Amino acid sequence: MSSSRATGCCISGTASAADGKGRAAADVRRSAAGVRPVRGSPAFGALFVSSGNTAGTRNPVRWVAYSDGHDTELTTGYGVRVGNRRAWSARLRRAGAVVAAVALPMLTGGAMAGAVPIAAPVLRAPAGGFQELVVPSEMGPIEVQVQWAARGGRSALYVLDGLRAPHDHSQWTTDTDVLRQFAADDVTLVFPVGGHSSFYADWYRPSSTNGQATTYKWETFLTRELPAYLARYGVSRTNNAIVGASMGGGAALTLAAHHRDQFTFAGSFSGFVNPTFPLWNEAVRAALWDEGRFNVDDMWGPAGDPAWHRNDPTAQAELLRGLPMYVSAGNGLPGAPDVPYGLGNTVNAVALESMAAAAAGIFRDRVAALGIPARVDIVAGTHTWPYWGQAIATARPMILDALGAR
């Protein structure tokens, strides 16, 4: 490890306001799958990384590698473990009063990764460092997990969750090896946390059937608030790709269709890409009711409302002309990856994937009729994470080519 002195730090691990202090210290633990420390550089005192597939359990370990050769853990009441305080204080004194004024509130439980950067662009964790940000939004603070580009590149890949999106992490980071897949690539991975049953859309109003207090405004967040925030870290607002699984798959295509100035690639894995197909609106209604008692009428209105058409990638296919796309779905036949999930879950996954495959076929036929190039694969598999990990691996070369990030 380099012996050069650390002159700054990049601290992550802040809990969002929605999570509260209940996540204190629980976020930092060594994973059985292991984590790899990222070596510090002269410009960075601490880097935070996480890797490994934990099969559905969270693995947000943040190991810190100082550039002077001391591997240490940091923790505060918000999930960052602090070690070797004497050495840390010395580093702050050497860094000067300006750096100390920023870093000391962080060490006392103040605003950490969620703080607004003090300059634009600001220094950030290099070489694939993993960081958790808390981003202001119209919906309130939103946690975003980030793996920075390996060589400081400006392009970004937004990765969207499925219907059951957890409130405290992206399932992509725990249920697939996507962090490892892109670890050496010069693209920043962006994992918005939350969005449970939202379809990543701007809703008309809060759900009237479950006491929801805030109106979902996910399209606004993903296309305005989050890109503006990441731009202060040097991430491009215009050279982004977007992909998603299940609920996030259709949303990825929809967002790309309506925001061509932001997205240069879109991918859907087992996405519901034709919700206006006759009676399929009722399937969306049933899914939202089952997963949180959400009312679909508060999202897009009754069937026939213009919002349904606007959020249907097949109906909006013309807006996708010229955009590199990858759409995949399974054929519904279970395989070895389904075994750990048990019979009941596999039966559900077969049924869901049969609908996703039908929707992918309709989308394929629609873009073909319009003369719009798109890669659409119907492969073996069901509606579950191991297959989506395979799908993003297939999409990876296409994503890197579209972003110019090889």
Image (cartoon, helix red, strand yellow):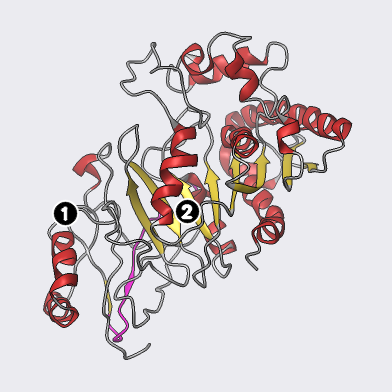
Q: Can residue 398 be found in the magenta stretch?
A: no
| Principal secondary structure, stretch drawn in magenta | loop
> Disc 2 designates what residue?
54
Residue located at (60% from left, 45% from top): 261
Give the quadrant of the N terminus.
bottom left
Q: Kindly tell me whether residue 198 is visible in this rendering.
A: yes
Q: Can residue 62 be found in the magenta stretch?
A: yes
| Residue 215: image location, x then y, percent | 38, 23
SS for callout 2: loop
Between residue 316 and residue 194, name the one nearer to us.
316
At label 1, counting other C-alpha atoms closer than 10 Å, the crowd grade (few under 14, some 14-19, many 20 or more) is some
| Residue 374: image location, x then y, percent | 79, 43
At label 2, counting other C-alpha atoms closer than 10 Å, the crowd grade (few under 14, some 14-19, many 20 or more) is some
**Can you tell which quarter of the image residue 356 is in?**
top right
> Disc 1 designates what residue?
110
Q: Are marks 1 and 2 in contact (CB under 8 Å)?
A: no
| Residue 123: image location, x then y, percent | 36, 68
User: In this picture, is 231 found above or below 135?
Assistant: below
